[in-house]
């Protein structure tokens, strides 16, 4: 009769995608130019930025690049002098593109493999927010076969089908001490997949300005049987049945972009991009466990994201044929409303600067280097759901390198 | 190759990135108008770090005064905060309850006392009082945490009290039976600059936890006089401090876990004909009233956590013959297991009066007030979310209260410490940093 109610131990795996996870690392040339590329036909990365421009590419190419991402976040809990830092971990977004078409034909086909969303955040097991998140490793890999057709000398269109594979590995502490005072642990781990499409149109105007418009659709990524691993004291094992699985569905948002290219001299390329990201589709994060108990209930966490936008500008200067120097920057608004900021992606409005170098090692082989620095504006927040309260500051450093073979 | 050189530069850059942590400026520490050089804590079991039905080393180390002191230390300029800790060999102190599991069929928690490595030295019979358990003496000379389990405000000027309470006795020099130092004199013997005072709980709790049978409520006027005297002495040299109000006894799991409805439902499972439980209840809500009579129990009657529910239905001898315990007016649940509706009303009335005294005396001296009465009532009504942990006033699962249903877990004490710190900072313009409640544990599960 002295029944205890363990029911209040709400397990709210606060997994959230955010602008912080939209890594935008489509290609080294484009990163160097501030992530512009919708209105340019530079290389195979057009498969990602604007498949409409692929048919306008002068050559066939194969390229591969990697952009190790260092996400550095610090957190100062409200009313304290404590500062917690994320561990030094490197996420590795990559991209690879292949474009081919007969020289004389008005069409080209291509395949892109890229990682537009991903993140790696590790706050460790000893920090104040350990019951909200310890670490999150998230990847989404998109595969996109693409067809692009030049309708006329001044306009081409293109589109591709997107298949995405998402993997997630989330860990958090559970406030259930064992006999030695150690916390319980929850781990949600799994992979899922989703579908979408990417289509665009590309214009070359008479005034030597190029214009691109692109739409990447939402890709609903469903994890249908991820592992829900709970390590709890033995006396509570029946409340957390093992093995257990979970179902979750997460919409990776749609992105609409318009971009412009300007070519004031032979040596200069200037680009402008604007993006609108439909994060409003991310209203709620629901976890459905295969086995429920009075303690382990399905969860339903409101996220209520708003749409985000970004504005980008970049330039490329080619002093001689073999060399290209690039620079750019941009601003992106956060999708996360006040009260919903979570430590796995302490999202905030952000600006960034990029730079890049391109060099032709041989006649058909280019190497491109890029570097990006992102600064997230400091954000002081109390999360509505977890009451974790404090100030986040985050910086992101992304070096990158790619090799392109073209013919 | 030129590009090779650039790759090297890039690689060097990448390696150095590990060091680029975003910096956050934390506030410049300030003590405001308070002086934390020597902080003393005055109070009862809650102040001592009592938990799980006992005082033991881990509880002492996680007492709220010790947490407050650690946070004060971050401002600099404070002395060491010394607690009368049990030694490592006697870490289990008075002994305490441990959770050993849950009943397979009912889910009820099973607890067992820890009986090894105790600091108990014996029992002494004090004439006219009774048996007093004594503990190994605290060997140190300095004390900052003067929390004494069991002490009432009513005891602080009573000279022989050191002979009646083993937890106080172990702090005093001299032999059991010979003590004559009042608590008030003892705590103020050495100069101090800052105090917290959370006395007064036992003046109501002693009555309540004994179901209104084993103890009495301290008279309201006596409480007022003693509290004023205590505060006058604590602030005699202009010291600043913080006081806390007394929680509503009905907000604690000790009175809310074993409910009339739960017992009745369980009885009815076996015997659907049973209509009601019967309790021996107080006939009026006055302190003077002594009349008790059996009546059917209602949701307003609070059954204590320690009530042996197995007694229900067992045949007991009554003037009307052998009858099932708790199920007839002739065999009601005994007084000591029930804080009945009138006793609840009476206790609440006294607690309200005590708290009015605490708040008005504190206000008259410009002392910070940590309103634990309101805080814990809010926790009971709405729960509390701290850093992703859902806490409430529930037994075991609530995370705040320890296994005795009255005292707190280390996490509960950290939350209390933070409430004190907030009150102190607000009153004196200081900025003692808050403690990280997530780093303190709740109930331990086997």
Image (cartoon, rainbow, N blue to C red):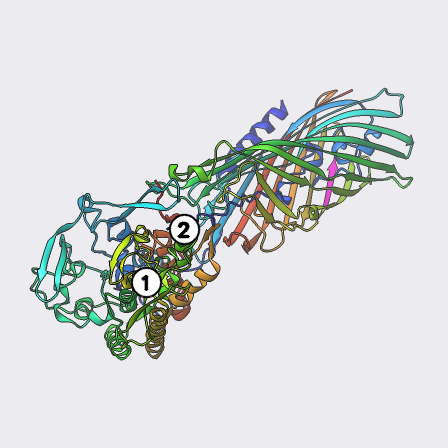
Q: CA distance from mark 1 to mark 2?
A: 23 Å
- Give the residue at mark 2: B271
Q: Quadrant of the C terminus of chain A?
A: top right
Residue drawn at x 48%, y 60% as measured from the top left: B382
Closer to the eye: label 1 or 2: 2
The image quarter containing residue A109 is top right
Local SS, label 2:
loop
Foreground pick, A54 / A225: A225
The image quarter containing residue A272 is top right
Q: Pointer 1: residues within 10 angstroms few (<14), some, or many (20+)?
A: many
Judged left or right of residue B389, residue A260 is right
Q: Please say whether residue A67 is visible from this viewpoint.
A: no
Q: Pointer 2: residues within 10 angstroms few (<14), some, or many (20+)?
A: few
In the image, residue A107 above or below residue B211: above
Residue drawn at x 36%, y 69% as measured from the top left: B344
- Give the residue at mark 1: B338
Majority SS type along the magenta span: strand
Q: Chain of mark 1?
A: B
């Amino acid at each position: 009769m002295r029944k205890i109610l363990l029911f209040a131990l709400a397990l709210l795996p606060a997994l959230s995608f955010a602008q912080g996870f939209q890594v935008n690392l489509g290609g080294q040339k484009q990163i160097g130019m501030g992530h512009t590329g919708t209105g340019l036909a530079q290389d195979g990365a057009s498969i990602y930025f604007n498949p409409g421009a692929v048919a306008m590419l002068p050559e066939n190419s194969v390229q591969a690049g990697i952009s190790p991402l260092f996400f550095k976040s610090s957190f100062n809990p409200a009313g304290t002098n404590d500062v917690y830092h994320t561990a030094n971990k490197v996420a590795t977004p990559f991209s690879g593109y292949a474009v081919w078409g007969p020289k004389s034909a008005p069409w080209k086909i291509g395949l892109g493999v890229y990682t537009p969303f991903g993140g790696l955040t590790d706050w460790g097991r000893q920090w104040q927010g350990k019951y909200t998140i310890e670490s999150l490793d998230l990847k989404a890999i998109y595969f996109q076969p693409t067809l692009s057709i030049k309708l006329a000398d001044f306009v081409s269109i293109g589109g591709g089908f997107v298949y995405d594979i998402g993997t997630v590995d989330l860990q958090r502490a559970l406030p259930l001490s064992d006999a030695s005072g150690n916390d319980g642990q929850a781990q949600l781990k799994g992979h899922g997949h989703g579908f979408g499409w990417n289509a665009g149109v590309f214009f070359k105007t008479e005034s030597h300005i190029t214009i691109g418009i692109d739409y990447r659709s939402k890709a609903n990524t469903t994890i249908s049987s991820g592992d829900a691993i709970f390590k709890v004291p033995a006396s509570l094992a029946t409340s957390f049945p093992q093995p257990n699985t979970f179902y979750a569905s997460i919409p990776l948002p749609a992105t609409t972009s318009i971009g412009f290219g300007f070519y004031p001299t032979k040596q200069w390329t200037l680009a402008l991009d604007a993006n609108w990201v439909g994060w409003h589709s991310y209203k709620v994060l629901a976890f459905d466990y295969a086995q429920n108990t009075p303690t382990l209930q399905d969860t339903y966490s409101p996220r209520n994201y708003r749409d985000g936008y970004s504005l980008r500008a970049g330039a490329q200067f080619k002093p001689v044929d073999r060399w290209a120097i690039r620079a750019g920057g941009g601003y992106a608004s956060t999708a996360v409303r006040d009260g919903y900021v979570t430590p796995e992606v302490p999202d905030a409005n952000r600006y960034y600067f990029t730079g890049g170098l391109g060099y032709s090692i041989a006649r058909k082989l280019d190497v491109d280097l890029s570097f990006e620095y992102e600064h997230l504006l400091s954000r002081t927040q109390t999360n509505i759901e977890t009451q974790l309260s404090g100030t986040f500051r985050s910086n992101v450093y992304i070096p990158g390198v790619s090799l392109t073979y073209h013919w | 190759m030129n590009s090779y050189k650039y790759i090297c530069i890039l690689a060097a850059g990448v390696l150095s990135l590990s060091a680029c942590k975003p910096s956050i400026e934390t506030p410049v520490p300030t003590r405001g108008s308070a002086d934390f050089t020597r902080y003393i804590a005055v109070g009862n079991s809650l102040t001592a770090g009592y938990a799980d039905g006992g005082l033991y080393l881990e509880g002492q180390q996680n007492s709220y005064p010790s947490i407050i002191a650690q946070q004060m230390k971050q401002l600099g300029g404070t002395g060491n905060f010394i607690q009368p800790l049990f030694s490592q060999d006697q870490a289990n102190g008075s002994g305490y309850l441990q959770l050993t599991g849950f009943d397979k069929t009912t889910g009820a928690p099973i607890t067992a006392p820890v009986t090894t490595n105790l600091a108990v030295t014996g029992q002494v019979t004090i004439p006219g009082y009774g048996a007093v358990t004594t503990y190994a003496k605290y060997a140190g000379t300095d004390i900052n945490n003067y929390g004494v389990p069991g002490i009432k405000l009513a005891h602080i000027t009573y000279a022989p009290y050191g002979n009646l309470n083993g937890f106080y006795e172990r702090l005093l020099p001299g032999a059991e039976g010979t003590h004559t130092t009042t608590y008030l004199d003892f705590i103020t013997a050495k100069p101090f600059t800052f105090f917290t005072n959370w006395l007064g709980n036992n003046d109501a709790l002693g009555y309540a936890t004994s179901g209104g049978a084993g103890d009495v409520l301290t008279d309201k006027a006596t409480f007022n006089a003693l509290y004023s005297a205590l505060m006058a002495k604590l602030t005699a040299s202009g010291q600043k401090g913080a006081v806390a109000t007394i929680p509503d006894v009905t907000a604690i799991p000790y009175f809310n876990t074993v409910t009339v409805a739960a017992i009745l439902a369980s009885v009815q499972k076996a015997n659907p004909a049973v209509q009601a439980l019967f309790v021996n209840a107080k006939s009026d809500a006055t302190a003077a009233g002594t009349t008790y009579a059996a009546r059917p129990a209602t949701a307003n009657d609070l059954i204590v956590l320690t009530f042996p529910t197995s007694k229900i239905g067992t045949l007991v001898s009554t003037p009307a013959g052998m009858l099932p315990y708790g199920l007839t007016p002739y065999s009601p649940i005994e007084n000591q297991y029930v804080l009945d509706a009138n006793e609840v009303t009476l206790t609440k009335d006294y607690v309200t009066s005590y708290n009015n005294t605490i708040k008005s005396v504190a206000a008259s001296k410009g002392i910070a007030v940590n309103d634990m009465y309101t805080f814990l009532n809010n926790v009971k009504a709405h729960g509390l979310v701290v850093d992703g942990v859902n806490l409430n006033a529930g037994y075991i699962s609530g995370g705040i209260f320890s296994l005795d249903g009255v005292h707190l877990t280390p996490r509960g004490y950290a939350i209390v410490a933070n409430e004190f710190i907030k009150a102190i900072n607000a009153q004196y313009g200081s900025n003692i940093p808050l403690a990280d409640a997530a780093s303190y544990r709740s109930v331990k599960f086997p």
